[in-house]
Amino acid sequence: MKSRALGQWIEKQLAERPLRANSLIITIYGDMIAPHGGTVWLGGFIRLVEPLGLNPRMVRTSVFRLSREKWLVSEQIGRRSYYSLTPAGRRRFEHAFLRIYEDARVPWDGDWQVVFLPGESMTTAARDALRKELLWEGYGSIAPGVLARPSAQSDALLEILQSAGAHDKVVVLRAQTLGALSARPLKELVEQCWSLGKVAAEYLDFTDRFRGVARALRSASSVDPEQCFVIRTLLMHEFRRVQLRDPMLARQLLPAEWPGDIARALCRDIYRMCWTGTERHLMATLETADGSLPPADESYHARFGGVGVDAAGKSANPDPSDRIAS
């Protein structure tokens, strides 16, 4: 039986914040479908997202656009279309969601990666695209054409430069902070270049929005699987949006009481409470060309420190035979 309180919360959220179909589909594929093989029948997917306010025409238009953008690829089998993640799309998902399910902040010893974007070695469009990728990865714009990140890790940078074909078009330097790592001028630079105040405000807004649904879930004797799916989708869609704006700086560079910690803990708790119901709903609604949705891969259960695992440490995938009438 559906919870009236949860239903009212869902209705309020959908009314207040209309969802963009393309972005919502990316959230669902990355969070829910990728671990189950990454391929589903379009008809089942249309039925899955209907409670989120997406009609069949919106879904078909969006998956077509995502296919053109190399996120998805379609295969026609008989009269049915099956949409799968492309290898490039899967890499994008894995890269984006890794920072969501794990707190990627590591201790900082004062090292910096500094990238200079020369004005004449790249086209304006290519330069802007590279800058956008670097900003998403946590680099800050410290001067015109100069981006920096307080980290010694260069793997992500090298991958971005290789993918953009810019490895021989930019200048990359390694720098070291001299003096105290927590000096006031350094923190002022960080606040200015990474707009931490705006990121903190978004985390506070996230917490305000989802604190009530967490209380309702804890007090509910049982939760409808479809409501679990909708809540988890809204949860991850919003948390993903905030995370994309968080530069994931080391804790030495953050304010003492960082609201991102509370937001992450809240997201983790709601995710765990909705996990079983969501998985049952996915199994009951989605299909592949071979029939039922396959069980999720084992890495799925490591999210947020462990979900869907029984007392013995074994994964607890819902029964794929538990299907709803079509």
Image (cartoon, rainbow, N blue to C red):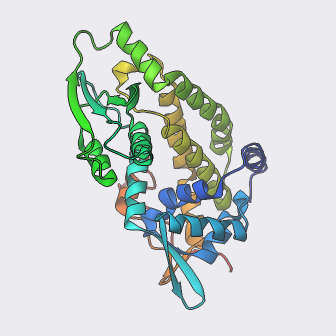
Q: Farthest front residue?
A: 120
Specify whether residue 323 is in view.
no
Q: Position of residue 319 (x, y in %)?
A: 51, 71
With respect to residue 46, does 51 lie above or below? above
For the C terminus, which image quadrant? bottom right
Q: Quadrant of residue 89?
A: bottom left
Taking the image as shown, residue 320 lies to the left or right of residue 312, namely right
Taking the image as shown, residue 193 lies to the left or right of residue 180, namely right
| Picture mark count | 0
Q: Position of residue 226 (x, y in %)?
A: 66, 61
Front residue of 302/102: it is: 102
Q: Quadrant of residue 21?
A: bottom right
* Residue at x 37% of width, y 33% of height: 139
* Residue at x 33% of width, y 9% of height: 183
For the N terminus, which image quadrant? bottom right
Taking the image as shown, residue 38 lies to the left or right of residue 80, namely left
Q: Position of residue 49 (x, y in %)?
A: 66, 63
Front residue of 79/273: it is: 79
* Residue at x 47% of width, y 29% of height: 261
Q: Position of residue 301 (x, y in %)?
A: 40, 55
